Amino acid sequence: MRKILAFRLSAMGDVALTVPVVRDFLEQHNDVELSLVTREFFKPMFYGIERLKLIFPDLEGKHKGLNGLLRLAKEISKTEKYDYVLDLHDVLRTKAIRHYFRYQGARVVKIDKGRQEKDDFIARKSITKLKHSVYRYQDVFREAGFSPFEIKPKALKVKPYSKKELEKFLEAKNVDQSKPMIGIAPFAKHRAKMWGLSKIEVLISLINEDNDFNFFLFGGGKTEAEALSQLAGRYPNVYNVAGNLDLYAEIALQERLNWLLSMDSSNMHMASLCGVKTISIWGGTHPDLGFSAFGQPDDHCIQLPIEEIDCRPCSVYGKKECSRKDVLYKCLEDIRPERVYEFMKDKKLIN
């Protein structure tokens, strides 16, 4: 049995995109065991994958900093001898770890993130659709010498116990489960990727005029949960998920959705990996940089054409603050709720 050690520490959306690769690789390579170093919070996304071992470092404690990472590498090497070490992250932290294992005699391969291609896209030196992150992860396994393998978009599995937890939540909220269940994920890590709660509320009001749906609001953290609770409190058919369900149960809920509206965020990736129709709104970032919802049609992305707005995309990950002098975050502000409403009617998502 060949043994692989792989690293992907963050961010949540990027880790989610490793799931279909890891799951299908192991399903199609029965003579391999894989250990993945990642954050413990991401554990639910890897539920049900056979021959996968998750290793959770203490990045805020004993494994913090360069010395801490070397300590982590030594701890891991004492428990197993790995034939391959795959760096699916390629940041300073993982570089230190992979160099350690190279000296230990393992075959080490790192991801090609296509940084120059992405920089050229942002600078408009080349506007071509780039390879999806899922296939960049797949390339690492191929470069290590493993045979090609097919990747299926539906990758997340639901833990049976989480279905019971979800049912308790729905019953406590008196949700009429005969109605269509719609997900909305309004938040993202950076401002340049967030459409805004006020627009979300206008959209919900428009949809409610001619449709009888249940809306479920997804988010994370205390501030987001409070904002979503306030929004949900203004509508009898809108329910806040943030802070009320753990990640296992959120995955169970997303799998049951008719469709989800999301920003460029981890919820977008998780819903698509649940096999759910996913509509996404894009501002400062761009789906063609390789971060679109995997397995979803290109026309499920709502965005202003870059030919119409000369500053978009402004960055690969949305970290850059808007520098416009006329309308801040024009790339998002010019996407009006009425436009999204008509888009959904055209896609026959609503009446």
Image (cartoon, helix red, strand yellow):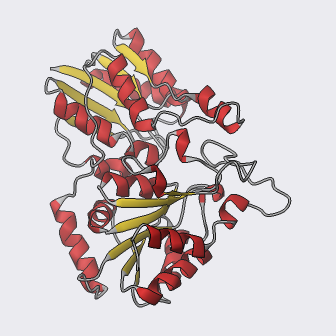
x then y, percent, for residue 89: 47, 32
User: Residue 141: x, y in percent?
Assistant: 33, 23
Q: Is residue 38 above or below residue 154?
A: above
**For this rendering, which residue is in front, 264 or 31?**
264
Figure quadrant of the C terminus:
bottom left
Outermost residue, front direction? 346
Residue located 39% across and 71% down the image: 349
Where is residue 164 drawn, in percent x and y?
A: 18, 71
| Residue beneath the point at 41% across and 90% down | 236
Placement of 270 over or under 141, stated as above or below: below
- Residue ID at (38%, 25%): 139
Vertical comparison of 277 with 115: above or below: below
Q: Position of residue 301 (x, y in %)?
A: 50, 56
Between 277 and 320, the one lying in front of the other is 277
- Please tell me which residue lies in front, 164 or 157: 157
- Quarter holding the N terminus is top left
Residue 225 in view of the camera:
yes
From the viewer's side, name the closer residue of 257 and 306: 306
What is the count of numbered marks? 0
| Quadrant of the image occupied by residue 18 | top left
Q: For the point 52% across and 83% down, which residue is it?
A: 206
**Residue 243 seen:** no
In the depicted structure, whether residue 295 falls above or below residue 122: below
